[in-house]
Image (spheres, rainbow, N blue to C red):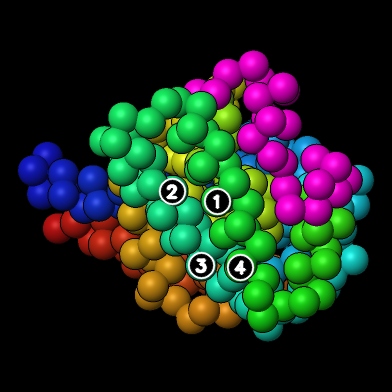
Amino acid sequence: MTKKSLKNPIIFLLALTALLSFSLTAFASGNYVHDPMENPKAAADIIVDPNAVYGYSPNPESPRLGVFADEDWSDAAFVEEMRRQRVEYHDSVKELYNMKSEMEAEGKSVEDIARAVSTRRNEIRMETYKDDPVGLEKLKQSNLESFGNENGGTPDYFYAKYGSWETVIEKAFSTNAGADACLGLYDLYYDTYIFDGKTVQPTTVEETTEAVIRAMSSTVDSSMRSPQTGDSPTAMIWLIFVSASVMAICVAALKKNRES
């Protein structure tokens, strides 16, 4: 048997082993490529919760998310509704980019832009809960505890805290990474989070990895996409079984090639 005849099966086996190992790791961590607990801001607002749909729930001691800690984060229907609202909010924030560009074209000052986008960002956040009065009250309570204002942090609040109107603008575009982690959105909006004053720019490897995870997720039943969806033992055992079976087939193929 020639080296060439073994080359392709070996490459295939190694690639498959790496992919399956990675998929099992991602599966076991709630399908997140990036670990939310490595983000200091997210880690301050959430806790690892094996019973939660996406593996994380609000930290009861968090000033921002603590008021939501008493909700049932293992309830798929509740989490899905919260997720819908969260995506709607993220989409609405795009309005701020247009506002900033228009004001810059009009020659407005940095302070004017900061005041406008910061105020509008609070309005958008409140509007997200227009059909959820209970959630709106919790948001107001959270805002009061964090900013002393039920509508959210004012432009003056953020300027007094950071001493820069540029930072006030930056904060208007930032989002709560902990909330996204609880709702299965952490990877999707990872490049918008601010670490040490800078937004994250994913590498090509990370982008590729996320694409692989999305592709794999689309091929399995939705009940298996997270180990916290209510059927985690069965889902994990099933995935391990399939992985082991494929590996066995590859090994058998290699053995056959060696004997030929």
Mark positioned earlier in the residue sequence (1 or 4): 1
- Overall secondary structure of the magenta stretch? helix
**On the image, numbered disc 2 is attached to which residue?**
96
Mark positioned earlier in the residue sequence (2 or 1): 2
**On the image, numbered disc 1 is attached to which residue?**
120
Point 31% across, 29% down: residue: 107
In the image, which disc is placed on residue 94?
Answer: none
Compute the Cα span from label 1 to label 4: 12 Å
Asked if labels 3 and 4 touch by Cβ distance under 8 angstroms, the answer is yes
Compute the Cα span from label 4 to label 3: 7 Å
Point 67% across, 71% down: residue: 129
> Depth-wise, is mark 4 or mark 3 nearer the camera?
4
> Depth-wise, is mark 1 or mark 4 nearer the camera?
1
Mark positioned earlier in the residue sequence (2 or 4): 2
Q: Residues within 10 Å of mark 2 (few under 14, many from 20)?
A: many
Amino acid type of the residue tagged 2 in the rendering: Leu
Mark positioned earlier in the residue sequence (2 or 3): 3
**On the image, numbered disc 4 is attached to which residue?**
128
Point 58% across, 18% down: residue: 164
Which quadrant would the C terminus be assigned to in this image?
bottom left
Asked if labels 4 and 2 touch by Cβ distance under 8 angstroms, the answer is no
Compute the Cα span from label 2 to label 3: 14 Å
**What kind of element bears circle 2?**
helix
Point 38% across, 73% down: residue: 218
| Residue 125 in sight in this render | yes
Q: Nearer the viewer, residue 19 or 36?
A: 36
Please state the horizontal and vertical placement of residue 9, each as a whole percent of the image: 21, 53
